[in-house]
Amino acid sequence: MSGPIRVTVHPPSPSGGRRVRVDGEILGLAHNVTDVAEFLRRAGWEIDPAEVPESPWIDWRGVGPERWGPEPIG
């Protein structure tokens, strides 16, 4: 692939999990960084789950890789 891949991890959904897109294509709903790494592996890119939070080509929308569940009510 030419140029860097563009991975977007969207904010947590109201029911939990975060939509993951690569170059605009939805790969799935991740519930942790291991899910993100698995989606990328299936798309042809190898990344260790430990590298996902700090990867410069992953755009974490809303919140960082520490949040996966629904927003707390309160």
Image (tube, rainbow, N blue to C red):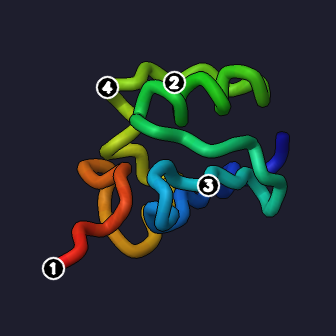
Residue drawn where x is 23% and y is 68% of the image: 72
**Residue type, label 3:** Arg
Q: SS class of the residue under badge 2?
A: loop
Q: Residues within 10 Å of mark 3 (few under 14, many from 20)?
A: some
What is the distance, in whole Å, between disc 3 and disc 4 at their CAs?
Answer: 19 Å
* Point 78% across, 58% down: residue: 23
Residue of label 3: 19
Q: What residue sits right under mark 4 in the picture?
A: 50
Q: Which residue is tagged 2?
A: 47
Classify 67 as above or below 46: below
- Which of the pair 42/32 is nearer the observer? 32
| Gap between marks 1 and 2 measured at Cα | 36 Å
Numbered tag placed on residue 74 in the rendering: 1
Q: Which of marks 4 and 1 is nearer the N terminus?
A: 4
Could you classify mark 1 by the number of other residues whose Cα lies within 10 Å: few (under 14), some (14-19), or many (20 or more)?
A: few
- Calculate the distance from the C-alpha at mark 2 to the C-alpha at mark 4: 8 Å
The amino acid type of the residue labelled 4 equals Ala
Binning the other alpha carbons within 10 Å of mark 4 as few (below 14), some (14 to 19) or many (20 upward) gives few
Q: Which of marks 3 and 1 is nearer the N terminus?
A: 3
* 64 vs 71, nearest the viewer: 71
Pair 2/3: label in front: 3
The mark closer to the camera, 3 or 1, is 1
Amino acid type for the residue under numbered disc 2: Ile
Question: How far from the left and from the top, in percent, is residue 34?
Answer: 44, 25
